[in-house]
Amino acid sequence: MKALVKAINTVAQNPEPAASTKLGNTNLRRLRVDACRATYEIDGDTVAIKILMVGSTAV
């Protein structure tokens, strides 16, 4: 979980890291780190980031 928190914190500097995936034709992105994931939204040009969900993937 610490790795996911670190990855989420780095999203503030780079909202679209290579490790993230764009979800459809929306402002939503998914970030996977190990068995955890976070879904977040990039809101506007000022890059306001809202973490919408944090969970674990099926192993």
Image (spheres, rainbow, N blue to C red):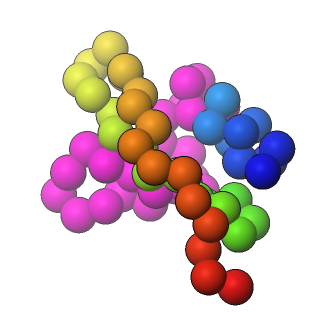
Above or below 39: residue 5: above
**52 sits to left or right of 5:** left
Locate residue 16, reporting x and y percent.
Answer: 47, 42
Above or below 5: residue 53: below
Question: Among all residues in the image, which is located at the extreme left?
Answer: 25
Which quarter shows the C terminus? bottom right
Identify the image quadrant of residue 48. Answer: top left
Residue at 55% across, 45% down: 17
Identify the image quadrant of residue 57. Answer: bottom right
| 40 or 46: nearer the viewer | 40
**48 sits to left or right of 16:** left
Residue at 57% across, 59% down: 55
Magenta residue check for 59: no
Question: Among all residues in the image, which is located at the extreme right?
Answer: 2
Question: Among all residues in the image, which is located at the extreme top?
Answer: 46
Residue at 58% across, 24% down: 13
Q: Looking at the image, how many numbered discs can be counted on the residues?
A: 0
**7 sits to left or right of 19:** right
Locate residue 3, reporting x and y percent.
Answer: 80, 47
Secondary structure predominantly adopted by residues drawn in magenta: loop
| 52 or 27: nearer the viewer | 52
Locate residue 36, reporting x and y percent.
Answer: 66, 62
**15 sits to left or right of 47:** right
Magenta residue check for 25: yes
Start-end of magenta stretch: 10-31
Above or below 52: residue 31: below
